[in-house]
Image (cartoon, rainbow, N blue to C red):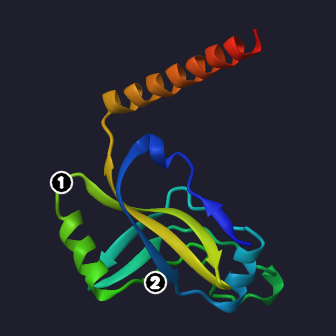
Amino acid sequence: MVNIVNRGIDYRYKILDKFEAGINLKGFEVKSLRNNRGSLNGSYISIKYGEVYLINFQLPPYQPKNVPKDYDPNRPRKLLLKKNEIIYLTTKIKEKGLTIIPLRIYSKNNLIKIEIALAKGLKKFEKREKIKEKEFKKIKNKIEKTRIII
């Protein structure tokens, strides 16, 4: 069961739309992912010439001794999306402040899938507001729990 999550996304971005895509991987990379090895931190998605790529996704080899010598763990990996989804994403990222980010990698029916999102970067004051809201909710939940006990 594969489940690799890109942490801290909700703090830095406001998610507008989500998509599910397949990933073009080699056999030993799939084995490595099934062991939950890999990191989405610092990775992003780029569209070049009508093709979508996952850039800077770190995926160490399953068995280092059986890996080809020219293997690059940070190589760009092609994502498999429908044509109309790619067109939609390319038109949206031309808008100011919108970007495409990877959210998580997971397995679905023995296939490796990636969840990507069209997102807008948050400004500093918006990040502060999010932190304040989160702290307020924690305090509110603590108060409600103590009322139930008494």
Q: How many marks?
A: 2
Which badge, 2 or 1, comes first in the chain's sequence? 2
Mark 2 is surrounded, within 10 Å at the Cα level, by few (under 14), some (14 to 19) or many (20 or more) other residues, namely some
Comparing 51 with 73, the one in front is 51
**Circle 2 residue:** 78
Quadrant of the image for the C terminus?
A: top right
Residue drawn at x 81%, y 81% is 63
What label does residue 96 carry, if any? 1
Comparing 36 with 46, the one in front is 36
Q: Position of residue 133 (x, y in %)?
A: 45, 25
Q: Is residue 5 left or right of residue 56?
A: right
Quadrant of the image for the N terminus?
A: bottom right
The amino acid type found where label 2 is placed reads Lys
- State whether residue 19 appears in this view: yes
Q: Position of residue 99 (x, y in %)?
A: 31, 59
Residue 149: quarter of image: top right
